[in-house]
Image (spheres, grey):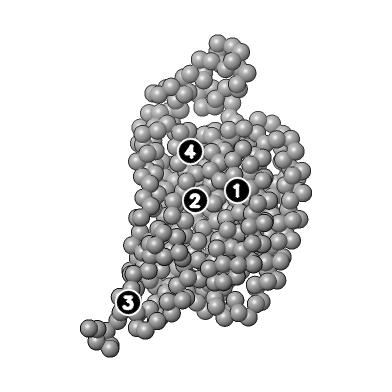
């Protein structure tokens, strides 16, 4: 029998609905208050990095889809940029601008999903339904670009798998007002809602120093007041050509993380509108037969195109970056998403290491929930937007 002063041990997850079946939080409780805890990860380990080592450079793109499957295109782009760094090539201007547009659409989609799940787990089902309506608008645009809604496989080393259809820009312009209407409804429903504020204000706080020590990036770092954003601080693609703001908070709590994601969606929409205005014409792939697959009419219409296709696809003959290593990072919805790739001059990666942005957040759960009630774990966990495929890889 437990002593009245002894803490009670409680295992929360991995089957708990709020932990998404992926992590286990081992709680030490004094009544309903968390005294201490540890986190167990690894329930969804996919072997991403080892699979990349046995597949060609372009074949690994389908595995990046499954890292953060809520914003798959950003993972596609981040990986391809790392390989392009090894090859020392720069993609055409149209490709870069299209990558920016689809990255920001993916950021909107990811933030919508995060906020929807977070507030639903706090009991706000109506708000969840609003955000799903807006997410559907984004899914329709992503489907137009690549033919898929979730696992996109859209980019290629040196460019894109295909150009967007002629009516793509008009479709985006038609849907942006609808997305803004939903975001405004969501904002009015929750941002100043006393019940919601009482549920998430001053919950799961992290200071600037603590967030930096834990390796936070993205909305959770900016919620503490640190204005770090990979798009602004280490620009990639052509992000330095666009005007956008970096929202920051002050308390580093669940409420600040919510507000920042809501604000960032509007900034993403503004970037998309700017990018559409300056979207150039031209190719979407580098003009290099050793990297880019030939057009299908050449494959089926002449022997040179057929041989080029054969050489790039057959095992042992594909893209062969020179020996070396390269690290490339992009601003994913959760923060800095990095890919470290190593080449030995072969047609497959020697090493492909992913830096998942939500790993430090999940590791810091014991720090964020200490002293709070068991019921506070749900909004805290929802605010970190943990994605299992990205966390365990």
**Which residue occupies the foreground of this view, 149 or 201?**
149
**Helix, strand or loop under label 1:** helix
Q: Earlier in the sequence, mark 4 or mark 1?
A: 4
Q: Which residue, as the protein is rendered here, is positioned at the far top? A: 303
**Helix, strand or loop under label 2:** loop
Question: Mark 1–mark 3 contact, CB under 8 Å?
Answer: no
Cα separation, mark 3 vs mark 2, equals 31 Å
- Circle 4 residues within 10 Å: few <14, some 14–19, many ≥20: many
- Can you identify the residue that label 3 sits on? 28
Cα separation, mark 3 vs mark 4, equals 41 Å
- Circle 2 residues within 10 Å: few <14, some 14–19, many ≥20: many
Q: In which quarter of the image is residue 52?
A: top left
Residue at position x 54%, y 25% in the image:
293
Q: Which residue, as the protein is rendered here, is positioned at the far left? A: 1
Cα separation, mark 2 vs mark 4, equals 13 Å
Q: In which quarter of the image is residue 26?
A: bottom left
- Can you identify the residue that label 1 sits on? 103
Residue at position x 30%, y 79% in the image:
8
Residue at position x 66%, y 76% in the image:
192
Cα separation, mark 1 vs mark 2, equals 13 Å
- Can you identify the residue that label 2 sits on? 68
Q: Which of marks 1 and 3 is in front?
A: 3
Q: Where is residue 352 in the image (x, y as percent from the top left)?
A: 39, 42
């Amino acid at each position: 029998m437990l002593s009245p002063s002894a803490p009670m041990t409680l295992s929360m997850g991995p089957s708990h609905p709020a932990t998404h079946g992926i992590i286990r939080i081992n709680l030490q409780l004094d009544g309903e208050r968390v005294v201490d805890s540890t986190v167990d990860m690894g329930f969804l380990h996919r072997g991403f990095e080892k699979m990349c080592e046995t597949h060609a450079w372009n074949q690994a793109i389908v595995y990046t889809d499954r890292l953060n499957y809520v914003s798959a295109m950003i993972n596609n782009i981040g990986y391809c940029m790392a390989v392009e760094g090894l090859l020392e090539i720069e993609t055409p201007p149209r490709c870069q601008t299209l990558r920016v547009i689809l990255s920001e659409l993916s950021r909107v989609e990811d933030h919508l999903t995060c906020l929807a799940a977070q507030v639903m787990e706090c009991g706000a089902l109506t708000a969840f339904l609003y955000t799903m309506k807006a997410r559907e608008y984004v899914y329709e645009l992503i489907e137009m670009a690549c033919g898929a809604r979730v696992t996109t496989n859209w980019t290629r080393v040196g460019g894109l798998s295909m150009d967007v259809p002629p009516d793509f820009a008009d479709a985006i312009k038609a849907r942006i007002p609808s997305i803004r209407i939903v975001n405004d409804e969501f904002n009015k429903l929750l941002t100043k809602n006393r019940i919601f504020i009482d549920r998430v204000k001053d919950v799961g706080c992290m200071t600037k120093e603590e967030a930096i020590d834990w390796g936070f990036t993205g909305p959770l770092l900016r919620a503490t007041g640190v204005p770090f954003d990979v798009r602004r601080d280490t620009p990639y693609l052509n992000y330095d050509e666009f005007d956008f703001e970096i929202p920051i908070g002050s308390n580093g709590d669940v409420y600040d993380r919510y507000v920042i994601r809501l604000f960032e969606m509007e900034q993403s929409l503004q970037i998309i509108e700017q990018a559409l205005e300056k979207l150039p014409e031209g190719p979407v792939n580098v003009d290099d037969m050793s990297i880019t697959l030939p057009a299908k009419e050449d494959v089926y219409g002449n022997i040179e195109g057929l041989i080029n296709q054969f050489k790039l696809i057959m095992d042992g003959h594909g893209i062969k970056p020179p020996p070396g290593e390269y690290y490339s990072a992009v601003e994913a919805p959760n923060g800095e998403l990095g890919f470290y790739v190593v080449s030995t001059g072969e047609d497959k990666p020697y090493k492909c290491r992913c830096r998942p942005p939500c790993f430090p957040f999940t590791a810091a759960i014991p720090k964020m929930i200490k002293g709070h009630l068991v019921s506070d774990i749900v909004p805290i966990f929802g605010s970190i937007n943990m994605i299992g495929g990205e966390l365990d890889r």
